Amino acid sequence: EIELYYLPLERARDPQGNEITISIGGPDGEIRAFVWKIRVGRTPLFLLDTNLPENAPEAREITARLYAGESKIRLAQEVLLGIGGMRALEAMGLEPTVVHMNEGHASFSALERINILRKKRGLTFDEAREVVQASTVFTTHTPVPAGNDTFDNNLVREYFAAYAQELGVHIKVLLGYGRVFPRDENEPFGVTPLALRLSAHANGVSRLHGSVSRAMWKDVFPYNPVEDVPIDYVTNGIHVPTWISREVSQIFTRYLGPEWAEDPDNDRVWEQVNNIPTTELWRAHERCREQLVGFTRFRLSRQLGQRGASRPDIQAALEVLNPDALTIGFARRFATYKRATLLFRDPDRLDRIINNSERPIQFVIAGKAHPQDNAGKDFIKTIIHMARQERFRRRFVFLEDYNVHLAHLLVSGCDVWLNTPRRPLEACGTSGMKALANGSLNLSILDGWWDEGYHRDFGWAIGKGEEWEDLEFQDTVESQDLYNLLEKQVAPLFYDRGNDGIPRGWVEKMRAGLRKLVPIFNAHRMVQDYTNRYYQPCSRRYAELCRDNMAGAREMARWRSRIMTGWGDVAVLETASSDGQERLVGDRITISAKVRLGGLSPEDVTVEAYFGILDPDGDFKERETAVLEPMGQMGDAHQFSGSIGCRKTGRFGYTVRVTPSHKRLENPFVMGLVKWA
């Protein structure tokens, strides 16, 4: 149980100093919630709590645990987070200009922002939606459809039938916002389609994940090629000062300067890693490994003691691992796609590799499975069973009760960080970044962040980024690749020592990773990306739409309605260029197009040449766009013209597309309207 009175919490208060309690409508009546405030550094974090005496027993359970298994409780949690969260901010007198929805769990916040604007500013649903959509950012984290919450339509009706009336829309329209195919009434309601439709910007959390997400959700934007689905990516990053050890931090302060932690994405700062003496960097890392081994022995002996193990077994636990041996860490949530047991695919070969008398290898493994993930729990059982075998007993340790303190020791004390997900199911994965910042090397499948961060100068890649249909065969191939790397590359490099006992080739890899990767894969860079690419443009757009007592929003809604009504008449009638002729690299090709706009004007649309290198099937391998400018009207068509550059050799193609005006929309693709030549 959590004892509230011993936590650094206080009740959140409104501008008049009154404690805040919010309420949301539920199928069985009103649900009330306290609002708690906790300071995380300089940032206030607000928490919602339904464990109030006036709530029904089932309502008090809504905030009892994360990721409830029952669909009804899960929907209640997301309604509370989205609608209740916005009501809590309003009660505190806070009116955000930008809202960032982290995963679909918070998607109902967009509906409540529309609701608040309707009540406070007298807007219609369409007018309020313009403001909300233009100022909302959505980040998806889950690269499989099953990981995106969906709910039965009847359950959603129970919560939203009356709420839809408040919003000024029919419940069928509201349900359509949450479906990939809005008119399919048999499709369940999904929070991710809702978030995509009500956000100006959407992103995955790594380059590969952005690509996977575009393919997953292409049917929400059916008229765009998958490459143009409006889901970008911002790769996650870690807060470097939090995760590095004291030993490494002291070295950074000495050689990178005392202000290194305030500028962790500055390449010039990390270039100074070259100034760190090899001996000093290696000795600092060795001290971290010694601390990990010492803690592991203590924790393992305690685990055995709590189970009533014999004194000889407890004494043996105090002697596991070798503080001088190559130490590999594996610690994460034990979801099945992370394949924690891949290492044990061929136990006999693994035995020969790790028990090599000249080049021993040892592993420290930790992590937890979701309470309802029985397959993940079975992985943990398998690892513990294998670790108890005599041939592995001194080489493998599984540590229970995985927490932040243990994670800190692991990422700083391991020589190698192992990651074996089934590509492309690891959206990003940040544990390897934490190890990297401590000078550890990564040995990983090319998935998540490692797909864009890998270079042989920094670590090792298992496989070459293949994606398999035969999963059993994939596990066999990739486990053998893992064994080959351990046996032929990782261990030999670690034990290749000079007369001073230092593996200079290994330390150069450590240094290269610190110098080249840490300035990229850190939270400072990540927040700058979100700020520059999303938050600032959205905030400016919010101000534009709210100008003159919401005149901008009303004007924008009228314009969108005119575009939606008249789009059926838009067509590209004719295109012209010097087709089929050979051109030199550096030449420019003039493109012209006749476009019928019906009742729309050239200012209502953006006409572009869409061009690039073609593959053998005639599809675009790469594509660029160039705006075609209006040149006048000819009969019932408008003439547009521009030029495109030939910058690469190969087979080159182009087409012309028309979209709603890029100048009028924060993201023109979220309307889902496009016409092609």
Image (cartoon, grey):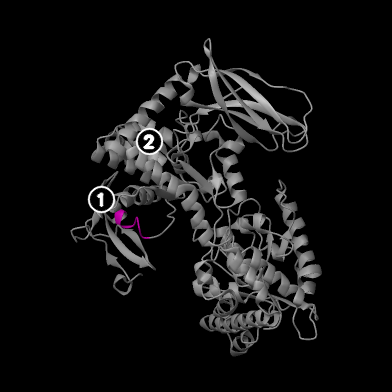
Read off the residue under disc 2: 130
- Residue drawn at x 61%, y 44% is 211
Query: Residue 113 placed where, x, y %?
Result: 33, 43
Report crowding for label 1: few under 14, some 14 to 19, many 20 or more residues within 10 A (C-alpha).
some
Where residue 384 sits, quadrant-wise, is bottom right
The quadrant in which the C terminus is found is: top right
**Residue 112 location (% of width, % of height):** 32, 43
Q: Amino acid at mark 1?
A: Ser
Q: Quadrant of residue 282?
A: bottom right
Amino acid type, mark 2: Glu
Magenta extent:
59-64
Q: Which mark is residue 23?
A: 1
Tell me, yes or no, if residue 380 can be seen here: no
Quadrant the N terminus occupies: bottom left
Q: Percent x, y for residue 209?
A: 59, 49
Q: Earlier in the sequence, mark 1 or mark 2?
A: 1
Q: Considering the numbered disc 1 on the image, is that residue within a helix, a strand or a loop?
A: strand
Closer to the camera in the image, 14 or 586: 586
In the rendered structure, the answer to whether residue 60 lies left or right of residue 217 reads left
